[in-house]
Image (tube, coloured by chain):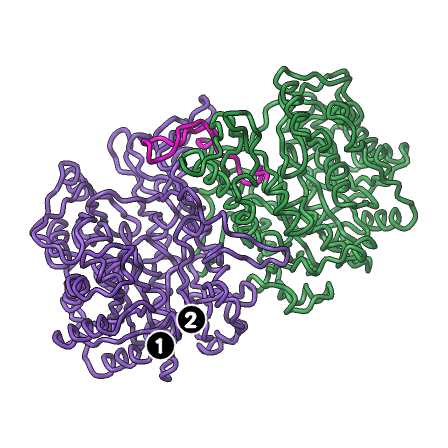
Chain colours: A green, B purple
């Protein structure tokens, strides 16, 4: 059965029943149909939230074989509920663009899914659409100001770094020229579209404490310069109020359910390379207010999502995780060990052993934060017992908890061992969480700390442009912001070809972008794709809907 | 008090109470929060709907002074309910773009409003966002096919007429070049963005009977030609299933309430110049299934919205209106009589009398369809009694019902006289509705019939391009489609400067566009703006939201 078929076979509970499980009356939530709801921000209770046990699910360096963090997070939360712990899984919202490309949805898989999967994967409750509109309103206002004679800030069009966004895989919009057609239709200039998940507004929404904080951050967005080289911010265009108004519902976290009828909160979906890559602070706090355990995930491998979760989000919001799950698969480790993608189903203990150092480095990294990791082996049917034994043996030698998790096949029942490990860590191990670096350090020190300690690099090199950017950052008084390094997810290094645990490499910072609204700097190493394309045969060719509204071909 | 202040002062009823008024149980609707809901298509009952009395609200040729069709429609429905007739008002959804420009919202005014006005004017239930995504998915798939080597239809990029859309007033996107940046980022070509309301998908959604019909129409969208001059339709790209899936909720009509707690259905918002300019067939049928009276409006003046409503929508969906309300204001008639916009508050019976022929022509036009009009004078505080007397005298001489409607100030109570006229027409006058033309006529005859009989032109001239387009239409076998003439709303002629009732003019058809999916042809006279711009000081500068989510500055 496909994921969609499994999802549709499950009878969903009315969302008011799910809300009741969290102690919310049905008139306290805002229903979107029978199976989705928004939870008002007033339900967040910071004091209460601090008593919840926050569990982060991350992974080894991603490979084309897939690791299954979302599926693992959902399965773990089901497992915790089966152990009698009230657990809420808090996830990111899927982006619409990839649904029509190759990737398909992002709502888990097999018997560890959140539902209604068609709705969550399509427009859901409209959050991405609202973020897109808020972003593009600012874009329109910028070009309108450039066009205007009577209300001009004197913006130099060549300095405008703010693009437009669309939640679509549309490579033709990457590089465009706008404002053609004569004096009545704008000032011609180069620009482009990013996918909505890459919008700074998405990053802002996910780091904001509340509507007031959101509006302040929106006003802080750095646009570019005037002809006199004065920096221009969104607040100079008096647009942050209208942008915040557009986000009035998007800022509220969404409640849905897992296949086993447990609560799931899904909210926000920032990129994990150029942004912080986790769900919203608001959603995490809501989960922690309402649940004894809060299971959340961070995008890509632990070098990207987890590092940013711990150094940016946790520092910003005062969160302290209690345990970290490192998701891994036998297949992916064999790939890191040099095996070809096509032959990964064949047993190969040599390749597996060769791939283990990737896992080892991610485990070390988690320990650097004073946290206790547990390895979750996301089981595939092609895994062999002697391969599983190798990982278990590795874990034993390194004194790390490990669990075989059959979440895809069995849901929460397949995660009982993992859930028990997590409970044991929470109840027996005292958490000594400390971020890797203080935001007060200078920018280069922050970058170098991550590069050397987390990526395992020998050092960092900066391009001329990056050094120029550093001066700009100092001039704008933004040195105190944390760094959100944009790096390939495929390798611990900045070279996608270097699998396993690369050593003896240098990280090259090509440029440093300013996300003054979100409140971080983005040092960029390598090429970052912010607007994907579609394959020759896009997934849209197989998606259909019948007259009764039943969708097929989503996976 | 502003409209927003009046709207917020009113205590709204829970949407389930509004649904109950229509005989719907609360679990039969899909709630979007407490005050909005979607009604499933299964609730439409065609047989039952035919018993409802359909009332069309239209207007004289629009002027900058404003006529207030939406306010009048809402007030009339309130008045009918006060008379004990169960009435549902069925309206178009506001476009988001103009909310940040000059126009403000489109949810009525004063004491004749639909609420919650902030929600309806912002993202509402996401319909515009879904239409935008369905449109832009097709755009992305077209450019992906042009880029693709292995799955190419051989589309000639220079023939692609399908643009992209965004619900934003953004003039810089009118004319753009996409696909720059090298071989990996598409094939460079000229294109642009229209505002979402101008999307053919919007027109399609509003003419579709159900999901199956919607999907078929989506597949029929004409894209352009191959290099061998073979026509290419959306169905050739196998994308109509995915597009329909994106519209699965947008196709359901939305239920809200009026200030007096009566039901209002709001759904779809196509342009009234380049498209049919009325709410969806589905919404109208839903209103007619659930209400004894169904009050609806059509965009711009009776020459545009009403003509298209009667010739395209009514013929397509088999609807028969029972009465037509022509909304007029003293101010607008004085403007048509040559008065300056700034002095319209001054009494001027000469200008008023000089402006009356505009009203006269619209009344004649409604009678040409075999329908009975009633004049609704939308009262303003600056109207003088002797001016009102002139219109009443004019109506008496022409044997036409007239009512002074104080809907802005008094809500339904201000529309009792109008409502009684409407009831009288429904109960006493037999409707002899017949469309102006048969779709079977050739294209030029259809255009000429509208130009001479409705606009009052002496004839029609066609540009070389229009004649070339006519040949294409014949070659594609699309002569049988109705014509949706794109003309300025400011005049009965195609010259915006000719106010009142112009005579002795020729309509020039510059080109004829094909909306094969929507199922009509668009002969274009004059310049049609499909992507508005923002003013020097956009309304967004005054829009704000506080920490509790209260919005100000929307009007």
| Rendered image quadrant of residue A332 | top right
Q: In this orientation, does residue A244 appear?
A: yes
In the structure shown, which secondary structural element does the residue marked by tag 2 occupy? Answer: loop
In the rendered structure, are the residues bearing label 1 and label 2 in contact, judged by CB atoms less than 8 Å apart?
yes
Is A179 magenta? The answer is yes
Report x, y in % for residue A513: 62, 28
Q: Which mark is residue B414?
A: 1
Residue plotted at (73% across, 63% down)? A22
Identify the subunit bearing mark 2: B
Q: In this orientation, does residue A409 appear?
A: no
| Rendered image quadrant of residue A503 | top right
Identify the subunit bearing mark 1: B
| Residue hosting label 2 | B111
Residues shaded magenta: A172-200
Vertical position of residue A43 compared to residue B262: above or below: above
**Residue nearer the viewer, B251 or A378:** B251
Near mark 2 (Cα within 10 A), the count class, few <14, some 14-19 or many ≥20, is: many
Residue plotted at (30% across, 58% down)? B65
Report x, y in % for residue B271: 32, 52
């Amino acid at each position: 059965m496909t994921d969609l078929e499994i999802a549709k076979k499950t009878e969903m509970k009315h969302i008011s029943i799910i809300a009741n499980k969290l102690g919310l009356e049905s008139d306290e939530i805002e229903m979107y149909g029978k199976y989705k709801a928004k939870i008002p921000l007033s339900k967040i209770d910071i004091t209460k939230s601090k008593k919840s046990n926050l569990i982060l699910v991350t992974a080894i360096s991603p490979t084309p074989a897939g690791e299954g963090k979302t599926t693992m997070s959902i399965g773990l939360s089901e497992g915790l509920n089966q152990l009698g712990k009230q657990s809420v899984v808090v996830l990111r919202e899927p982006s619409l663009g990839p649904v029509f490309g190759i990737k398909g949805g992002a709502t888990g898989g097999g018997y560890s899914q959140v539902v209604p999967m068609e709705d969550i994967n399509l427009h859901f409750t409209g959050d991405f659409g609202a973020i897109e509109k808020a972003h593009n309103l600012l874009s329109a206002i910028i070009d309108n100001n450039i066009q205007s004679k009577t209300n001009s800030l004197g913006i130099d069009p060549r300095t405008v770094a703010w693009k437009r966004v669309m939640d679509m895989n549309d490579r033709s919009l990457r590089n465009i020229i706008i404002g053609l057609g004569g004096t009545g239709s704008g000032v011609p200039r180069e620009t482009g579209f990013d996918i909505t998940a890459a919008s700074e507004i998405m990053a802002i929404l996910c780091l904001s404490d509340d509507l007031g904080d959101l509006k302040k951050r929106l006003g802080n967005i750095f646009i570019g310069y005037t002809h006199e080289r004065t920096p221009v911010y969104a607040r100079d265009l008096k647009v942050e109020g209208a942008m915040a108004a557009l986000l009035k519902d998007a800022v509220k976290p969404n409640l849905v359910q897992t296949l086993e009828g447990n609560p799931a909160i899904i909210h926000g979906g920032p990129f994990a390379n150029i942004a912080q890559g986790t769900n919203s602070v608001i959603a995490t706090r809501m989960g922690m207010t309402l649940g004894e355990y809060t299971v959340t995930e961070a995008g890509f491998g632990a070098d990207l999502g987890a590092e940013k979760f711990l150094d940016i989000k946790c520092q910003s919001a005062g969160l302290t995780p209690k345990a970290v799950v490192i998701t891994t698969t036998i297949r992916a480790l064999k790939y890191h060990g040099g095996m070809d993608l096509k032959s990964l189903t064949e047993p190969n203990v040599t390749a597996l052993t060769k791939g283990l150092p990737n896992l080892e480095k991610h485990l070390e990294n988690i320990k650097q934060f004073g946290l206790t990791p547990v390895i979750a082996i996301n089981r595939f049917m092609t895994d062999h017992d002697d391969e599983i034994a190798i990982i278990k043996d590795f874990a034993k030698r390194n004194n790390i908890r490990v669990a075989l998790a059959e979440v895809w096949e069995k849901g929460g029942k397949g995660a009982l061992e993992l859930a028990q490990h997590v409970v044991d860590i929470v109840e027996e191990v005292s958490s000594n969480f400390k971020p890797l670096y203080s935001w007060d350090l200078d920018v280069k020190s922050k970058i170098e700390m991550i590069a050397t300690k987390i990526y395992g690099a020998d050092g960092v090199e900066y391009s001329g442009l990056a050094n120029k950017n550093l001066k700009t950052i100092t001039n704008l008084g933004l040195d105190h912001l944390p760094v959100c390094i944009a790096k390939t997810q495929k390798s611990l290094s900045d070279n996608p070809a270097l699998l396993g645990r690369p050593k003896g490499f240098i990280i090259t910072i090509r440029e440093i972008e300013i996300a003054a609204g979100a409140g971080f700097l983005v040092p960029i190493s390598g090429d970052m794709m912010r607007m994907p394309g579609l394959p020759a045969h896009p997934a849209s060719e197989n998606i259909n809907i019948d007259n009764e509204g039943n969708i097929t071909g989503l996976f």
